[in-house]
């Protein structure tokens, strides 16, 4: 039996109309498809090359993180948050710490807030760099842009390792501050990396932005309207590419973002190209914030001395804390019943909720566009499936 | 002009390609087993137990308090307390772990055990060559495999280890000063008692030597 | 934004709705409104469309399981004991019925305010687990309500596509409920202790009811 007939035999072929002339083809993209950024399946119904229906299938990486956290102490969940969106562990730590601080009413010292902003924005830089690399890989620009992105990311990960001890599973934030202070020479090294970042962005932009093939593949592909973006709870760069002026750093005034001058780039079309450009522009703003934060960082304690590491029991109540993660609104909702474990622990995963509109964006497009649209949504399956 | 953007991009790749011959930060590849990246000091992977001195059993700092076992998020530590006691680094009689296992196939290197340990007994290692064809035995580290000397700790995390050593030295000095003061008070009292009346028994209680294992 | 004011505004404008303000004792101060299921959609629409509120962004939807509780109280009752009326202490057990709760966190992208926290409770945890779906009002509820259906078993009436999200379709139970029992599928666990060790032993005893020493060579 040839490969083609074997493949056809395993597919569910159904006629589109009575005559059976047009046949719809249902294929499963994934879970092992390299473009799905992990283990994610899309059941796609095709009419020729055109997408008629697309149903995402989740759960291949489901380990019920929320249930694990309910059986774990508050601190014990902190290392597990690294593994949600494993591309940006530090922002996950931050969101969780923020929610617990709201729940228990903990104050964070000045220096710790600066450390959080610095590490958080570095995380945003490396996430967006990689995302653009992956997006290009999805489009068939195999290798070069991704390798450039990874080269740059590695420099930032070295900074993370020098500070937190691990490149990706940092486990750095604590309730009321951060775990360790900056080692000697770290800040100078980080300043050098951040100062060199715009040069990399210039290179990256001249490599990609005006590339005609890229424009052809991305412009007017996967257009997301502003109304749908708001209604579907789309957040982060993805919403801003559709012109939704909503950046939680500006809206919630959490941490110390009020002190920094930065702009929020907005797109106008809401297509893949806008989502790609928004990330490039956001990185420039992150560099801005980083330069200001590293200039102003004060000396002082890095953790609230009143908060205990062991035997931490917040009073009964609940709190929802959210931050502007690199992928969108990352929130943690905690319900405490006064015991050492949270009664309810919920992650609001931006990757999952941004996938709500995947079908809307893909309908009527070609198969190859699915890959590009999915790449521009920026998902990490560790967070989608939790 | 169509193609201008592509040409611009090609110029960029050319710059990177030829630049890699002259600029080191454009060529980041390291030929792994032969060449190694320099170790970053804060790096951590799996925990190990620190011992003082030369004998790993005698000098083990762990007193089997089981705090790390309770706090470990994935519950990869298993401790059994000893029945007898041995003196710790400060000369105090303490129980010690009869069994101390860490399953590094479960451990996620979060270093919460290090943070909660009040005795500076457990620290993070940097040894990442742990692969093995034995799924269970080789990845279940027992007390002996976990024990590493304080010199080793000083070699892998110099800044952190010297801070810990300084703190412990200070504690020891404090204890010694306290013991000395107590001894002086005691001696004075005994001298007074001896002067007062008939000679009493004044042998100070001898501590029995610990017998670990 | 004052939740009291919003509550009275909704009560004035959505006829018949019953709202209850649930105070949150934690320092976060995020108090919430308990909606009744019949008028929930009308209230949600009101919150979304009223120009001064405009809660157009449904950020987070959470399920919470509150199992039924038995509260024992000691009360003194006057009773005839051996013909004499005496005060006797009796233990009375009152059962508080359990429910599944769904919590919504709404924000406004247009007005840039929020959050307002809404909650709804099911009648019980068995047959009455129906709640109205907010998916027609906010698209972002689509996947999150599916997740709550999957993990808690709340049935959202009016949801266009209520299937399991994370667990597989054939799965029977609801894993996030407090009374969920893990399946007995144990791997070798070298550092097992406490509850894990007990369950590992139990699993082993079930897997090999006849110990090898009892005769037959295995």
Image (spheres, coloured by chain):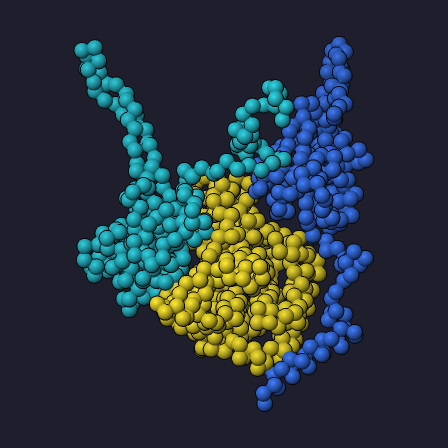
* Residue A17 image point, x, y percent: 36, 68
- Examine the image and state in which quarter residue A130 appears: bottom right
Q: Is residue A176 visible?
A: no
Question: Which residue is more in the foreground, B203 or A327?
Answer: A327
Identity of the residue drawn at 45% across and 51% down: C166
For residue A230, side relative to residue B24 (left or right): left
The vertical placement of C84 against B79, above or below, is above
The vertical placement of B208 against B41, above or below, is above
* Residue A4 image point, x, y percent: 55, 64
Chain letter for cyan, please. C
Q: Is residue A339 visible?
A: yes
Identity of the residue drawn at 32% across and 66% down: C54
Identity of the residue drawn at 68% across and 81% down: B11
For residue C173, side relative to residue A123 (left or right): left
Chain letter for blue, please. B
| Residue at the front extreme, as displayed | A1
For residue C141, side relative to residue A77 (left or right): left
* Residue A108 image point, x, y percent: 52, 54
Which color has been applied to chain A in this rendered view? yellow
The vertical placement of A141 against B87, above or below, is below
């Amino acid at each position: 039996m040839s490969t083609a007939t074997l493949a056809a035999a395993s597919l569910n072929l159904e006629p589109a109309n009575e005559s059976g002339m047009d046949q719809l083809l249902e294929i499963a993209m994934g879970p092992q498809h390299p473009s799905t950024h992990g283990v994610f399946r899309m059941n796609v119904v095709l009419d020729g090359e055109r997408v008629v229906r697309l149903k995402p299938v989740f759960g291949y990486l489901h380990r019920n993180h929320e249930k694990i956290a309910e059986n774990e102490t508050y601190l014990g969940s902190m290392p597990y948050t690294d593994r949600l969106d494993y591309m940006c562990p530090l922002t996950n730590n931050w969101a969780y710490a923020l929610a617990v601080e709201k729940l228990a009413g903990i104050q964070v010292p000045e220096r710790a807030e600066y450390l959080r902003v610095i590490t958080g924005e570095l995380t945003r830089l490396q996430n967006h760099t990689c995302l653009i690399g992956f997006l290009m890989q999805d489009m068939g620009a195999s290798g070069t842009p991704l390798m450039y992105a990874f080269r740059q990311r590695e420099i930032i990960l070295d900074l993370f390792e020098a500070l937190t001890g691990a490149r990706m599973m940092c486990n750095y934030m604590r309730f009321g501050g951060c775990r360790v202070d900056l080692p000697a020479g770290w800040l100078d090294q980080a300043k050098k990396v951040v100062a060199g970042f715009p040069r990399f962005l210039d290179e990256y932009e001249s490599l990609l932005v005006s590339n005609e093939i890229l424009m052809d593949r991305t412009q007017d592909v996967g257009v997301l309207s502003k109304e749908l973006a708001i209604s579907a709870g789309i957040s982060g760069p993805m919403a801003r590419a559709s012109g939704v002026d909503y950046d939680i750093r500006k809206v919630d005034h959490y941490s110390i973002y009020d002190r920094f001058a930065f702009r929020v780039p907005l797109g106008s079309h809401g297509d893949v190209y806008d989502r790609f450009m928004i990330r490039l522009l956001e990185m420039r703003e992150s560099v801005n914030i980083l330069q200001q934060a590293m200039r102003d960082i004060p000396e002082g304690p890095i953790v609230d001395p009143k908060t205990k590491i062991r035997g931490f029991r917040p009073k009964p109540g609940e709190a929802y804390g959210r931050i502007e993660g690199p992928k969108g609104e990352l929130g943690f909702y905690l319900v405490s019943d006064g015991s050492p474990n949270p009664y309810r622990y919920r992650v609001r995963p931006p990757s999952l909720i941004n996938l709500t509109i995947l079908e809307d964006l893909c309908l009527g497009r070609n198969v190859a566009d699915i890959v590009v649209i999915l790449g521009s949504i920026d998902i990490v399956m560790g967070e989608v499936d939790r | 002009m169509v193609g201008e953007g592509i040409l611009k991009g090609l110029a960029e790749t050319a710059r990177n390609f030829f630049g890699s011959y002259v600029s080191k930060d454009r060529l980041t590849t390291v030929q792994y087993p032969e060449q190694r990246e320099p170790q970053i000091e804060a790096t951590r992977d799996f925990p190990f137990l620190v011992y003082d001195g030369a004998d790993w059993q005698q000098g083990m700092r762990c007193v089997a308090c089981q705090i790390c076992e309770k706090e470990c998020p994935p519950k990869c530590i298993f401790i059994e307390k000893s029945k007898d006691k041995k003196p710790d680094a400060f000369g105090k009689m303490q129980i010690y772990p009869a069994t101390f296992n860490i399953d590094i196939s479960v451990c996620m290197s979060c270093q919460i055990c290090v943070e909660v340990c009040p005795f500076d007994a457990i620290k993070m290692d940097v040894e990442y060559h742990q692969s093995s064809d034995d799924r269970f035995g080789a990845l279940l580290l027992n007390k002996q495999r976990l024990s590493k000397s304080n010199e080793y700790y000083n070699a892998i995390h110099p800044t952190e280890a010297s801070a810990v050593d300084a703190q412990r030295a200070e504690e020891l000095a404090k204890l010694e000063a306290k013991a000395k003061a107590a001894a002086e008070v005691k001696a004075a009292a005994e001298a007074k008692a001896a002067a007062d009346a008939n000679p009493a028994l004044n042998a100070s209680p001898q501590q029995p030597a610990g017998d670990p294992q | 934004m004052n939740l009291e004011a919003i509550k009275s505004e909704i009560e004035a404008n959505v006829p018949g709705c019953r709202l209850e303000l649930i105070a949150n004792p934690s320092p976060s101060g995020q108090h919430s409104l308990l909606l009744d299921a019949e008028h929930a959609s009308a209230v949600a629409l009101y919150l979304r469309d009223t120009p001064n509120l405009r809660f157009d962004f449904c950020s987070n939807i959470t399920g919470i399981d509150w199992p039924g509780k038995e509260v024992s109280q000691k009360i003194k009752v006057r009773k005839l004991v051996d013909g004499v009326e005496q005060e006797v202490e009796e233990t009375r057990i009152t059962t508080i019925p359990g429910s599944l709760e769904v919590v919504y966190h709404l924000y406004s992208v247009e007005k840039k305010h929020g959050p307002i926290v809404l909650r709804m409770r099911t009648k019980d945890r068995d047959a009455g687990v129906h709640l109205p779906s907010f998916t027609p009002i906010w698209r972002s509820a689509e996947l999150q309500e599916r997740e709550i259906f999957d993990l808690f078993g709340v049935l959202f009436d009016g949801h266009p596509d209520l299937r399991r999200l994370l667990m597989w379709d054939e799965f029977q139970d609801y894993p996030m409920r407090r009374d969920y029992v893990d399946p007995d599928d144990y791997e070798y666990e070298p550092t097992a202790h406490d509850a894990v060790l007990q369950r590992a032993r139990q699993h082993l005893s079930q897997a090999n009811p006849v110990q090898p020493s009892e005769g037959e060579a295995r």
